[in-house]
Amino acid sequence: MANITKKVSWSSRADESGPAGEGTPLLNGSEQPRLSRQCIHAQSVNITVCVLFQSLDYDNIENQLFLEEERRMSYMGFRCLEISRWVVCGLIGFLTGLIACFIDIAVEELAGIKYQVVKENIEKFTEVGGLSISLLLWAVLNSAIVMGGAIIVAFFEPIAAGSGIPQIKCYLNGVKVPRVVRLKTLMVKVFGVICSVVGGLAVGKEGPMIHSGAVVAAGVSQGRSTSLKRDFKIFEYFRRDTEKRDFVSAGAAAGVSAAFGAPVGGVLFSLEEGASFWNQMLTWRIFFASMISTFTLNFFLSIYHNNPGDLSNPGLINFGRFQSDSVAYNLYEIPLFIAMGAIGGLLGALFNVLNYWLTIFRIRYVHRPCLQVMEAMLVAAVTATVSFTMIYFSNDCQPLGPEHTEEYPLQLFCADGEYNSMATAFFNTPERSVRSLFHNQPGNAVLNYNPLTLVSAGVFIPSLLIGAAWGRLCGILLIWADPGKYALIGAAAQLGGIVRMTLSLTVIMVEATGNVTYGFPIMLVLITAKIVGDYFVEGLYDIHIKLQSVPFLHWEAPATSHWLTAREVMSSPVTCLNRIEKVGTIVDTLSNTSTNHNGFPVVTNNTVSQRTKLCGLILRSQLIVLLKHKVFVELARSRLTHRKLQLKDFRDAYPRFPPIQSIHVSQDERECMMDLTEFMNATPYTVPQETSLPRVFKLFRALGLRHLVVADDENRVVGLVTRKDLARYHLGKHGLEELQLAQT
Amino acid sequence: MANITKKVSWSSRADESGPAGEGTPLLNGSEQPRLSRQCIHAQSVNITVCVLFQSLDYDNIENQLFLEEERRMSYMGFRCLEISRWVVCGLIGFLTGLIACFIDIAVEELAGIKYQVVKENIEKFTEVGGLSISLLLWAVLNSAIVMGGAIIVAFFEPIAAGSGIPQIKCYLNGVKVPRVVRLKTLMVKVFGVICSVVGGLAVGKEGPMIHSGAVVAAGVSQGRSTSLKRDFKIFEYFRRDTEKRDFVSAGAAAGVSAAFGAPVGGVLFSLEEGASFWNQMLTWRIFFASMISTFTLNFFLSIYHNNPGDLSNPGLINFGRFQSDSVAYNLYEIPLFIAMGAIGGLLGALFNVLNYWLTIFRIRYVHRPCLQVMEAMLVAAVTATVSFTMIYFSNDCQPLGPEHTEEYPLQLFCADGEYNSMATAFFNTPERSVRSLFHNQPGNAVLNYNPLTLVSAGVFIPSLLIGAAWGRLCGILLIWADPGKYALIGAAAQLGGIVRMTLSLTVIMVEATGNVTYGFPIMLVLITAKIVGDYFVEGLYDIHIKLQSVPFLHWEAPATSHWLTAREVMSSPVTCLNRIEKVGTIVDTLSNTSTNHNGFPVVTNNTVSQRTKLCGLILRSQLIVLLKHKVFVELARSRLTHRKLQLKDFRDAYPRFPPIQSIHVSQDERECMMDLTEFMNATPYTVPQETSLPRVFKLFRALGLRHLVVADDENRVVGLVTRKDLARYHLGKHGLEELQLAQT
């Protein structure tokens, strides 16, 4: 990929290397003497956005405070905690369902109004020939609606742009993308997606729904809103990264579930894209949230549609039910499906490459908010123009039967009792078009390739649309076949080729179509599309994650990385703190912007051997809270009534810890001492220097660590492995490569 | 549970405990001074089967040989490995599908023959009144067939008895149940399940299919058969526990997939019941194996049914397709479903308790093979008698319509053109009965409670049968409702109440019924059944695992175990070996039957501080191979041409390493030295003594460890944590309890 500015071919050198680390200075792993850095592509793609990505702590900070609290807690206390986890998951599901419901109703209502306005206008002007006025009205209307959304997004919360799935992937992976799970982001996102869909952009609601679910989860589980400055004093136990992540994965699942009516698919999405350690109880809670979400949506939509109690409307995106046939597909169709999968993989790869270049273009040239708003309006206007042109030149008239699936028939130039199917396709919301491609009777040769829209606020529906279109085309060319079936297969192939999910996508498609019969072909197609697509380029979300230079940890260390050891990958030298440390030193360490570390090994001096030994690990955020509360040894002695610092103080500060600059420490206080014993994690995970990279990686990934201390055989600290140290190794076409990552 | 012979209430003591380990002697963690052992139930349940459970090594042994091999391997080499992993998974799926196909065809054919014989006999004797002769013939026939199966199982391979699911669960958890994945076990199992089903026992094929898939996987992935003494010299890289486990989980998934035609359900089963570390690539391979398995079965069955190319027959157990209705269920039915879930949970708990006592009874009194055979025959005869009596007193005659789902109609006392539905239900294979309960029209009030058969060779189908029966009864009582739907819900509730799976079972039910509409009610019912059932007793598989005293690691450490630390749970003192050790010492250590350890920390003497430091970990199996090949320092010096020991030598010995007694070491050789440097794992995971139990547990479980070294702050070995040390803590009704586990 083009954003690799440091690239080294390791594989060719693997034979020369003797036993690992031979001759490497022990305390200077960061030198990496065998690493010859080549700057290629550096000129053309110097676009790395400098976002400071924080890591999340998915490993519990087991300090004395934490252990004391856990030990004080009775069995009943843990039962109550478990029950409140279920309650939170239920709430997450409920609220996510409500948001989905709100989006759906808002879109329906606004689209209905838009349709009425445009229809009246067209009917008025078609006969007198002033079609250009109608076009203008349509384009202006669409652009205005899109502009509203774009302004809000671009000026108020730019992180709310796009589908949000890459950001949630990063979050679940352990990277904190700034402001991604805030209330403001949620509101802007909801508003933005309504405007985009109503404004005629071929975007879907599933990405935004996943993001919304995650935000809801991150909010509800904390029992307070930092944005609204309200603290309900509940769920305080959940105010740490480990617990929050679990709820966020439940929220993402609830989002998928609400978007597609696919609760199982939602759970699988969360697991396939996010989780690493599979925990049965957690999975069940996620499942519960998904269920509640789809049920809530269902229930309220059934009331909205004046059909209360009928729960047959599970998701936002309903593909309609396929009738089960006794013989759904035949053996000779299998190779056809595989071929379609391969086509999907190819087209998906092409789409991803286009999207990649487009994103680079946009990052480089369309980075000012007003430009972004104009871009969105332009896209809306172009979409409207293209659509209108296609409608104008199309004369595909369909009889207005009692069983038509469209809601907005437009007569245009057709005879009475007929409607223009092209116009209908463009006026429909995108998922309705997908549904009509799947279900309309053969003979209705709707080949409407909706133009590849340029803003991607959810890639599912556009891909499904493209795939369904070419799939249906295939089905029509094979005269004997049911085009609806091929539209489904094509949609699956296209989507699979773009996002490269298999298991979860199969289940989502099966749940969304309400039919298991095509499960096997869909799987086959998805796996083929993935294999073919992976040959050319990565999945869309991975591309976006890479473009942001996020230190994303994949599932396993690169295959050929066995000859790298902890000694080579670790950061060194490490800033260590003493168990009882001078406040001045701590303040200086934290203020040092050049290093900007987040975790500090704590060492103690062994009086016998006169050597420093590792005895714990403390985080920047903890030190800041300690400084803020002035937990100094001298003060504790003088003021006997001094309140002991509790876990609650750390939780109250979570997650927006103040920067070190905001904490005032006087010159006298700088001379005080701070005792870290109680607050440091006394049992950090350590590895010896000779540990191979895959082994380090496995430990790091499986436990969701943020810092891993490298110690020598005397238990002295020699280095620190962080996420960035591991994420930068990448298996490219030329063997092991080193990536340029954003600062952490 | 009754097999707890040591029980202690920890929670009440939590407040008294000061800082962890205060006053505990450092090197004697096994003393556990605060542990007052109470022997309760000791008399009544002294039934622990003394099986020696080995642990599996799911952590790679990264010694120098391994690292050298990995470093030598090129990028292409890893690609080839990856491809061969996919090939192996394809093979596993194919062979599992074939086995399923074989079982199905054999059962069909034999059941057809049996039906013919009995039918002719009944028709001959019904009119002359000699019904007792028919009964006798039927009972004898069933008993004879069952006897055949029982003899083979009881005398040749007792491990093949039962469903096999608990054993596979244990294997995936990291416990090696002896002989569980051998070829002989597979063959006996297949034969046994055919005999049981044909012999009229209400058993299912899904447990055996899962077991068969696992055996196939364990065999195919090794590229050789130790039983047949054939080595194909392929897949040698996969000859270690880590790789084998991955394939076994694929095999289990393929088994589920073949049994129910549920590929996604199979993957989820594997994950929900087995895996801990969720790896995307692994999941996709498992998915692939599942797909191939169901496809193979499908393909061959379609040929057998003279309908080649029609792939609409996905699983062994086909519930038939439910027609999708537009309004599948209504809001007011939700509380009903929840109530049914609760009933299912209750009945499931009852079933589990009965099964528990029955199993204890059987372990205590029916432990001789001939007794077991007689038991099985008795069950078969009783089943036949009960069935026959019920048929005799039933006069539920149904018209022999063109659309009846039964294959074996029996007229008996019915008028011409009608058949006795009760007789049909008993003559059908159990899953056919389930299907007819689901699908027959209302009015056909088949209330046949198949007697609770006493041998459980697969609990799915009997549970489904019971559940479907009472569910249908509910449906009939609620006059307005569709009994088929309620039968489905009842079946789900009953099965969920017994096995306590949620996610995978939902997907399996959805895939097996081919209908997503009832997905939401099924989930609701399963979650309710699980919550209600868990209140009373554990799931069936967990009960069986506990009865076997398997050191099974659950998902998380018990909630109230935070005040236990590594110091208290570890085994100590530990037998350590020197880096260069005398052969005599090694032989004596391995021969010591009182300790019987499997892993030994390797220590080295630091010349400066005069203290021993941990420098590696070596396994019993490695030492045995070293002794066998006489890798002694002296010999290496004298014979310059001495072949260097390679990884291949270890792989050839895997997995059946010879016992130490079979290795002859002469008195001279006992004086030689052995250099372990090259063979030991130089970077074992370590934890400090103060690490809390949940933290140790998390590390151990997430990485699939077998030995975890506990080191002090000078890096000296103070203890060793093994699976048994962690598995014995259990959260009971009275707080934390300590279990009596089988020797490891």
Image (cartoon, coloured by chain):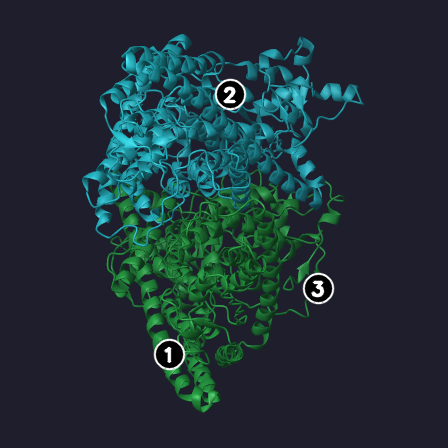
Chain colours: A green, B cyan
Quick one: label 1, few (<14), some, or many (20+) residues within 10 Å? some
Q: How far, Cα to Cα, is label 1 from label 3?
A: 51 Å
Q: Which mark is residue B678?
A: none
Q: How many marks?
A: 3
Pick the front one: A332 or B284: A332
Do the numbered discs 1 and 2 sit on residues whose CB atoms are within 8 Å?
no
On the rendered image, what quadrant is the N terminus of chain A found in? Answer: bottom right
Q: Chain of mark 1?
A: A
Quick one: label 2, few (<14), some, or many (20+) residues within 10 Å? many
Q: Secondary structure at mark 2?
A: helix
Circle 2 is placed at which residue position? B185
Pick the front one: A631 or B632: B632
Measuring from the top left, give residue A462's x and y in whole percent.
50, 65
Q: Chain of mark 2?
A: B
Q: Toward which corner of the image does residue A563 lie, by quadrant?
A: top right
Labels 2, 3: one chain: no
Circle 3 is placed at which residue position? A40
Q: Amino acid at mark 3?
A: Ile
Q: Amino acid at mark 1?
A: Lys
Residue at 29% from the left image edge and 23% from the top image edge = B452
Quick one: label 3, few (<14), some, or many (20+) residues within 10 Å? some
Circle 1 is placed at which residue position? A114
Q: Amino acid at mark 2?
A: Thr
Observer-side mark, 1 or 3, equals 1
